[in-house]
Amino acid sequence: MPRRVSMPTADDLFRPTAVHAVPDAPETAEPAEAESATLPKPSGRIRHDEKMTVYVTSDELIHIEQARLALRSGHGLAVDRGRLVREAVALVLADFDAHGDDSVLVRRLTEG
């Protein structure tokens, strides 16, 4: 039986190895900053015990891939599609928890 060698992916080869410090910005009391401080963090790169299959259209998949590549080229963030989707889900659920009936999720689901 032939053995398969595990090769690193492009994302593994080109991921940043150092944390870049962001200079302190002047303090401004904007609501968006206050809300982002209370958002729960998605799980990120850990071993996940649960699996959920989601079907998307080809246009949605292309949009996800374009966002992933833009994050990589424009921001130096090497994220996979799963992490990108988990981040998006965390943001939508946090907005739902904070705003309930006025959340983006409720508005979009009641539109169509």
Image: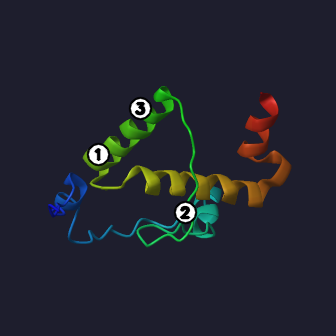
Residue type of the residue flagged with mark 2:
Thr
Q: Please give the name of the residue rendered at 78% of the width and 54% of the height, measured from the top-left corner.
A: 99
Tell me the quarter of the picture where residue 30 sits: bottom right
Nearest to the eye among marks 3 and 1: give it.
3
Task: Name the kind of residue labelled 3 in the image.
Answer: Ile
- Residue 5, x across and y down, in percent: 15, 63
Q: Nearer the viewer, mark 1 or mark 2?
A: 1
109 vs 31, nearest the viewer: 109
Q: Is residue 13 left or right of residue 96?
A: left
In the rendered image, which quarter contains the N terminus?
bottom left
Q: Which residue is mark 2?
A: 28
Classify 31 as above or below 81: below
Q: Which mark is residue 74?
A: 1
Q: Secondary structure at mark 3?
A: helix
Q: Look at 55% across and 63% down and name the residue there.
A: 28
The answer to the question of whether label 1 and label 2 lie on touching residues, with beta carbons closer than 8 A, is no
Q: Amino acid at mark 1?
A: Gly
Q: CA distance from mark 1 to mark 2?
A: 25 Å
- Labels 3 and 2: the sequence-earlier one: 2
